[in-house]
Structures are given as C-alpha cells and as structure tokens.
Image (cartoon, rainbow, N blue to C red):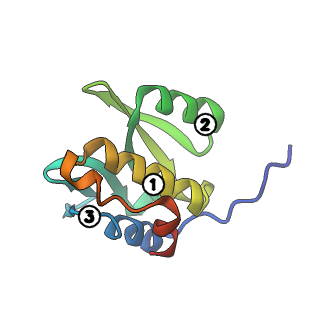
Amino acid sequence: MLGHMVAGVEIARFLRLLDALPGVQHAPSTRYTAFSVQGAKFGYLWPRTRTVGLKQTLSEQLALVAERPDVFEVQFTAAGFGWVVVHLHGIDLDELSELVLEAWRLAAPERLLAEAPAPADLLEA
C-alpha cells in the first residue's frame, strides 16, 4: 500500500510553531519539555523519540489513532480530553500546525483566544 509520502517535521520547526502562539511557556526537564499557556498544559516534546504529545478532544484522539496508528497513539485521557502522541517523522507541517493550534486553543484562556493566529499564519512562523 502506497500512502502519500510525508517528509516529517523537524523538532526545531515544531518549536517555531509553538513560539508563534501567544503566551506559550516552555518547561524543560531531563527527558521532555512541557508546554503550557497561562499555566494550562497543552503539549509535550520528547526529543529522544522525536515525538510530541498534544491535548485534543476525546473524539479527535480516537479518530487520529484509528486513522493512522503508525503516526498517532493514545497518550492518556484526563479531564475529558484525549492526549495523543504524534510521531514527527510521519506528519506534515500543515497537519501538525492544525493539531498544535487546536491543543493550544483547548488550554488557552478566553482573552488569549482572540489573539490566535490562523493556521496559515502558523505555517509562516
């Protein structure tokens, strides 16, 4: 089965996406970096495995994992949200930017949502 070829996304490019969003804080630790907005976590990066964890709705988590289990896996569910692990080698920048933006939106306070960039603007970051 030949799917469409995906170039994958480099870690540095993923970090530029995050930095284009208002109010994002990085909290590095030994094995991973956590990302939050106004204290609410919405993402993780594990450089060693080139994977990221992103907050999503439960239905989106299940749809992503069912559709492409080679790229997405269930990380955990908490507080009504489904976190998904994304393998950066298997995703393109368009899709990753949409998932990052959605994760940020699910965590951002109301007053920051008005400042959210459009997905196309994130691609330029």
What's under tag 1, amino acid-wise? Thr
User: Residue 94, relative to residue 39: is it above or below?
Assistant: below
**Between marks 3 and 1, how big is the CA–CA gap?**
23 Å
Q: Which residue is mark 1?
A: 51
Question: In this orientation, does residue 31 appear?
Answer: yes
Q: Tell me the residue at 43%/39% (across/down).
A: 84
- Up-down: is 13 above or below 112? below
Does residue 32 appear in this view? no
Quadrant of the snapshot with the C terminus? bottom left
Residue at coordinates 51% horizontally, 27% vertically from top-left? 62
What residue is at 57 percent from the left and 30 percent from the top? 63
Which amino acid type is marked by label 2?
A: Pro
Circle 2 residue: 69
**Amino acid type indicated by mark 3:** Pro
Mark 2 and mark 3: Cα distance apart in space: 31 Å
Confirm or deny contact between disc 3 and disc 1 (CB under 8 A).
no
Quadrant occupied by the N terminus: top right
Which of these two is toward me, 64 or 117?
Answer: 117
Residue 97 versus residue 7: which sits nearer the camera?
A: 97
Label 3 vs label 1, nearer the camera: 3
Residue 8 location in percent, x, y?
Answer: 61, 63
- State whether residue 125 is above or below residue 1: below
Which is more N-terminal, label 1 or label 2? 1
Q: Is residue 118 left or right of residue 80?
A: right
